[in-house]
């Protein structure tokens, strides 16, 4: 039996890039929404490493979905949005 001050929980894994096949550490949050599916204030998020930030931003941008790109350590989750 563990004592109360012994933490046996496993730390949460570091956030990783959302690009297909990439396991690099996430540095950026790309906040987006699909206006045909989501209310205007809703924000879904993808995470990006330095290498994939521009590619993922363009993918969302050409569809008119990209709303904001913020450094992960500066991201403030809007009320009612999905967690990164």
Image (cartoon, rainbow, N blue to C red):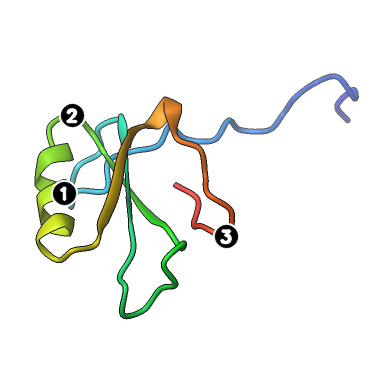
Which mark, by number, is residue 10? Answer: none
**Residue to which mark 2 is pinned:** 50
Rendered location of residue 22, percent (x, y) = 19, 42
Residue 25 percent coordinates (x, y): 30, 30
In the image, taking residue 17 as reference, residue 79 lies left or right, namely right
Q: Secondary structure at mark 2?
A: loop
Say which mark, if any, is on residue 80: 3
Q: Where does residue 37 sit, x and y in percent of width and height? A: 36, 79
**Residue at left offset 58%, top offset 30%:** 11
Q: Which badge, 2 or 1, comes first in the chain's sequence? A: 2
- Residue beneath disc 1: 56
Q: Of marks 1 and 3, which one's residue comes earlier in the chain?
A: 1
Q: Is residue 52 above or below residue 78?
A: above
Q: Residue at x 30, y 29 (%)?
A: 27
* Mark 3 residue element: loop
Q: Nearer the viewer, residue 35 or 81?
A: 35
* Disc 3 crowd, CA 10 A, few/some/many (<14, 14-19, 20+): few
Which quadrant holds residue 39?
A: bottom left
Real-space Cα distance between discs 2 and 1?
Answer: 11 Å
């Amino acid at each position: 039996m563990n004592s109360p001050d012994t933490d046996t929980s496993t730390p949460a894994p570091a956030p990783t890039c959302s690009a297909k096949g990439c396991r690099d550490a996430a540095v950026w949050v790309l906040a987006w929404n699909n206006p045909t599916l989501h209310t205007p204030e809703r924000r879904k998020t993808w995470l990006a490493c330095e290498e994939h930030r521009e590619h993922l931003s363009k993918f969302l941008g050409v569809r008119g979905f990209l709303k904001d790109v913020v450094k992960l350590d500066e991201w403030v989750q809007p009320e009612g949005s999905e967690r990164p």
